[in-house]
Image (spheres, coloured by chain):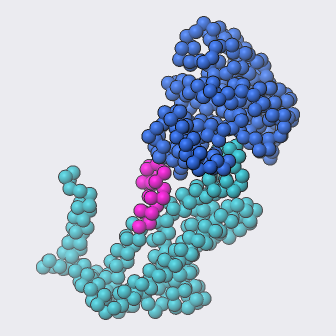
Amino acid sequence: MRISIQGVGIQFRKGVKVLDDVSLEVATGDFVALLGPSGCGKSTLLNAVAGLLDPAECAMLGRIALDGGARNGTRLGYVFQRDTLLPWRTLSENIHVGMEIHAVPVAHREQRTRELIALVGLDGFEHYYPHQVSGGMRQRVQLVRTLAYEPEAILMDEPFGALDAQNRMLLQAELLRIWERRRTTILFVTHDLAEAITLAQRVVVLSKRPGRVKRIYDIPLPSPRDPFEMRASPAFAELETRIWKDLRDEFRAVPA
Amino acid sequence: MRTLSLVSRRLAFVGALLLLWEALTGGLGLPAILDPIIVARPSAALQEIARYSASGLLVKDVTVTLQEATIGLLLGIGGGVVFGLLLGYLRPLAETVEPVLVAFNSLPRIALAPVLIIAFGLGIASKIFLSLFTVFFVIFFNTYLGIRSVDPELVKALRVMGGDRWDLARYVVLPSVFAWIFAALRTSVSFALSGAVVGEFVGSTSGLGYRMVISAGLLDTNRTYAILLLLMAIAVVLVEIAKRVEDRLLRWRPTAILAS
């Protein structure tokens, strides 16, 4: 799915302006990271794309088009930073939810769930409830729950932010593997520069609030990528230094 | 201590309490410290249960009381859920009626007993209503709060998956409301029972509460205590059933919450 963000500005009713004239084109199959200091409105932008903004709370200027049109009936996936699994459903039942909503036949559902559970190495945990497994496992389930109903684009809001470094790298590797296989459009919000470079084909740096697009970088690192090895490569270090120069000014300007 | 199972330790404790009680009331050949006219001796109370049972009244009274409590419980749960959902969804209505509901909730609900007996007579209807009211408010407030405390992040997650209003109700709102209702089940069961018994105290022609008040009036201490022990046993069994139902239905919850 193509995501087209045209001149979007968002202001909360309380008067805070979070985004100003943001334009961004995400092509089908693209993996774009939105990077910026906290409070720059990157999550708000993601919510706007997902249609989750409450018009009673904020006003939006500009236009967001999905595949050139309105949002009606398009399948979007959203992976939250916080665990949003249904606590009263087992892991496999949680993976079912999206498919149930989209009326995927039962036999299909079961089979796809088995595949997805295997994909993220959760075999044997299908019938556990979310509170019985670790944060990393819950986040894996959130990821495959989203893949299960085959959305045309996946929005991710710092999905690995709450994980320890080790788990984060493992999940980044899994996400890359999945993306390389399926080439679903991904818009990924993060405030972690290394994560953005590791994952994305393009990194969009947003300024501090009100967020504007400061610069867009192509990440010409070869595929398939391995997040563990990549960090040692000179190309990675060079990109990191270059983008950090831009980003530093934005981080500095934000009062702690 | 460690080598004994929990059940045997508990039984031993209950046994010790009964022995102590028996001794204090002049049993076991000891001088009575508590007058058996005022505090019945447990052995005498147990014998009285047998006599009560043999007279045929016990089955009749237990049946009446359980009937009142059960019907009151079911209607109270039903009504509480329906009104809770209704007000949970209709915010303006909820805001309008809230002060009145809060006032009713602050009222010691048992105080409705005389009013209900005037309205519905000495039969079982007035006890069912009292039982219903005591349960209704617990369930109603839990349902209502359950809707209010639905995690907005879960709602968002469902919406972005393409869920409509009905999907939201089915996947998020109702399960989370049921969690609150089941958590109130144990309390409701003992409330229903006390509603029935207090109703019988105030005015009735049968039931455990009725028999107890009559016995106390006649200074029949043994029978009064016999009924007290029966009520305790019934309550323990009912609450245990409610607890099992609750644990089973809420098994998805972290145990830290279940333990509370």
Q: Is residue A199 visible?
A: yes
Where, by quadrant of the figure, is residue A52 drawn? top right
**Which residue in the rendered view is the most extreme toward the left?**
B29
Residue B250 included in the magenta stretch of the image: yes
As drawn, B238 above or below B144: below
Q: Residue B7: image x %, image y %?
A: 26, 61
Q: Residue at left 69%, top 38%?
A: A151
Q: Residue A204: image x %, image y %?
A: 74, 21
Of residues A182 and B84, the one drawn nearer to the viewer in this rendering: A182
Q: Is residue B95 visible?
A: no
Q: Residue at left 34%, top 84%?
A: B224
Is residue A99 toward the left or the right of residue A120 in the image? Answer: right
Q: Main secondary structure of the magenta part?
A: helix
Question: What residue span does the magenta drawing correspond to?
Answer: B241-260
Where, by quadrant of the figure, is residue B21 drawn? bottom left
Q: Residue B219: image x %, image y %?
A: 33, 90
Q: Which chain is blue?
A: A
Q: Residue at left 26%, top 86%?
A: B50
Picture colour for chain B? cyan
Is residue A106 toward the left or the right of residue B167 in the image? Answer: left
